Amino acid sequence: MRLLVSGHHNPHFVTITEYIERAVRSLGHRLVVFEDRRHLIPGRLRRRWALLQRISVAAINRALVRLVERSRPDLVLVTGGHRITRHTLEALSRRGIPAVLWTTDPPRPSAGLPQTARFYHAVFCQGSEAVQLLRAQGIADLHWLPMACDPEIHRPAVLDEETRRGLGTPVAFVGSFYPRRAELLRRVAHCGLSIWGPGWDRLAPGDPLRCCVRGAGIGPAHWVRIYAAAEVVLSIHYRSEDERIPVYQASPRVFEALACGAFLLTDRQPDVLALFREGVHLAAFSDGHDLERRILHYLDHPAERRRIAAAGRGEVLRHHTYAHRIEQMLARLNFPESGNSEGCGAKPASFCRGDGLRARSLS
């Protein structure tokens, strides 16, 4: 089948959009690519004048419709969905081409996504909180479909001795600065913590975390080596400052770190604990005190770390790759799972609906 994927392509390194596209190709489908953030008007002007933002978004949507008319895909997969309008979705429907949405961020009630979601053929949500929010908005055809890993990119790195010495650290955190993350990480700054990610220059002078920061924005080619050189890799999920907006979704970094063979210590994110077994595939902590206690424990028990890391890598490769996700999506839509309609042998999907989301996993 011919599948058009609409998403943003980061010019500096591969991201979710490219992982999805790679999975589509690996399954034998014909891929059509659309960049949904190719604005005609610079951002500094669009931020000042709402009319210019609307004009630029309208131009992006016209370009998508023209590409659909030229390529005639069997299915349009929109990732994120923040710039695709109701009118475009209606235009695709009139042409007999189904469009589905795969959300990639926690949806905000004030954003336009709940208003456009109802015009998709189906909606797949990265996080179970998005299923709840969109259902409350009256959206019916909803499916929980978490992010995943790309085994060809997210895999154990072989490091030479010089690289291992340069990157080696007892505890590694890769992620953007948020106050809650900083508060937790201060509890374990003394445990050999190293931090990579954007925004950490906002730390106040004299903050104990300043000596832990080792780099800003980095791509997969670098952080797979960081994971290989660390004894413990931390995952601390984003939390909205608005308490009315829950965030349950599993960060892509969870799947990526596990696929890299890292020992992962994560906060108790609901979707993560619905997909993986604590103490078997990864470890989890509840608060700052628990985080410190568990880091010290696992640093002192390397055999236990290696056992959990190996089980976590095996689990994520068996059930949580982007190829699995595309197969699961197409199976739910009753499309053939692979380009030759024979599938690739992945485990059948078990999609989650209703309040029982956490009781069942996609495996």
Image: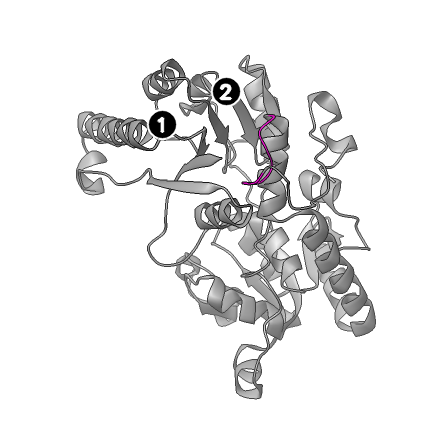
The location of residue 218, given as percent across then percent down, is 43, 63
Residue at left 45%, top 36%? 3
Q: Is 309 located above or below residue 162 in the figure?
A: above
Which numbered marker is on residue 84? Answer: 1
Residue, x 49% and y 50% (percent of image)?
22
Q: Where residue 49 sits in the image (x, y, percent)?
A: 18, 30
User: What secondary structure is found at the residue carrying circle 2?
Assistant: loop
Q: What amino acid type is highlighted by mark number 2?
A: His
Q: Picture quarter containing residue 263? A: bottom right
For this rendering, which residue is in front, 253 or 341? 341
Vertical side of 341 occupied by 20: above or below = below
Choose between 319 and 66: the one closer to the eye: 66
Tag 1: amino acid = Ile
Helix, strand or loop under label 1: loop
Horizontal side of 299 relative to 79 (left or right) equals right
The structure's colour scheme is one colour
Q: Is residue 142 left or right of residue 292?
A: left
User: Secondary structure of the magenta portion, mostly?
Assistant: loop
Q: Is residue 39 left or right of residue 323?
A: left
> Residue 339 in magenta?
yes
Query: From where the camera sits, is residue 346 visible?
Result: yes
Q: Is residue 17 magenta?
A: no
Compare residues 41 and 90 and report the one nearer the observer. Answer: 90
Q: Mark on residue 121?
A: 2
Residues shaded magenta: 334-340
Q: Nearer the viewer, mark 2 or mark 1?
A: 2
> Residue 203 sits in which quadrant?
bottom left
The percent coordinates of residue 90 (x first, y second) are 37, 15
